[in-house]
Amino acid sequence: MNPPGRVQTPIEGLQTLLHDDMDRVNRLIRERMASEHAPRIPEVTAHLVEAGGKRIRPLLTVAAARLFGYGGEHHLRLAATVEFIHTATLLHDDVVDESSRRRGRPTANLLWDNKSSVLVGDYLFARSFQLMVETGNLRALDILANAAAVIAEGEVLQLTTAANLVTDEETYLRVVRGKTAALFAAATESGGIVAGASDREVAALREYGDALGVSFQIADDLLDYGGASVTLGKNVGDDFRERKMTLPVIRAVAAADAEERSFWERVIGRGDQQEGDLERALALLDRHGALAATRRAALDHSERAKAALADLPEGAIREHLEALADFVVARVL
């Protein structure tokens, strides 16, 4: 129940509408993250899975299947697959990024160790493929397996772009599509496939998931230069300290004069960051309209997501999916 006067978010609306399915997905996740011989696996997995995440990706799979009236159970396995892939990538990411907080809590690698995080992530990837195979749907298996490869590719590409001031917007979007949008798109696409949607409808679902994922990540990158830790589950300026070339910085570097470029080369290129540098970076982002331009980019992809739904079945699920596209960027308005 929402407190009196608080409007339900689109995510909460979908969760309410699809409560029974999501309850079964959650039970399946808990069942499959168990290990008879290695109790650390469910301990580490539960730390993330039970951390209060909104389950957006598996929710999208269930919503896409139900949008077309699917009445079977394979969408539950695909939804659990999507969540396991996502959780595995989070475990690996926190090791790569040497992160200490995730969803407002200490990361698994901090509470246990890097080895446990990597190996449990590997276990969840293996579990995800077992779940995919159980559906017997080779097309869905192909989509999700490809997404897992694209995610890894995107993460490796991000490593090569970090601290690299020549990174352009095209490369940035390639990273975003790999690390975030690929799984959003696979989540919606696989849900439509298992429900027997037409090729045109499946393509529309993929377009929606891709656009939603891109807008979601751009908004997240923008929030890093102006959000609140309680909202993000991380500290404002983490991307700056980690020298990530996200869209706000790319825009500011492109517009920089010689003195400003020298600043970016020092703090991002060489990692020589001093007290007050984050504040100066924020001033430069504002001076060149980088934050406003990034905000517009997030909104453009949100509009693309809504447009993709135009010819899909009408009803409450579609309405919530449309509202979700607005919601992911409302954080930066």
Image: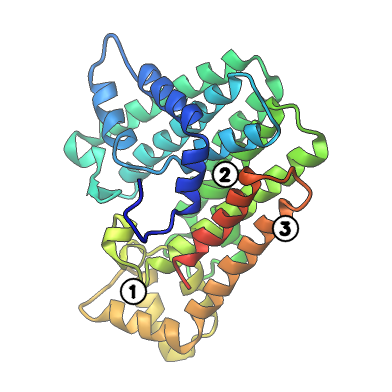
Q: Secondary structure at mark 1?
A: helix
**Rendering coords of residue 278 (x, y %):** 30, 77
In this view, 289 is above or below 45: below
Q: Is residue 177 in view from this perspective?
A: no
The numbered disc on residue 267 is: 1
Q: Which residue is mark 3?
A: 307
Q: CA distance from mark 2 to mark 1?
A: 33 Å
The numbered disc on residue 184 is: 2
Nearest the camera: 48 or 75? Answer: 75
Query: Contact (CB < 8 A) between labels 1 and 3?
Result: no
Tell whether 250 sits left or right of 88. Answer: right
Q: CA distance from mark 1 to mark 3?
A: 40 Å
In this view, 191 is above or below 274: above
Q: How many marks?
A: 3
Q: Secondary structure at mark 3?
A: helix
Q: CA distance from mark 2 to mark 3?
A: 16 Å
**Rendering coords of residue 60 (x, y %):** 56, 40
- The single residue placed furthest to the left in the displayed view is 111
Nearest the camera: 323 or 266? Answer: 323
- The single residue placed furthest to the top in the displayed view is 36
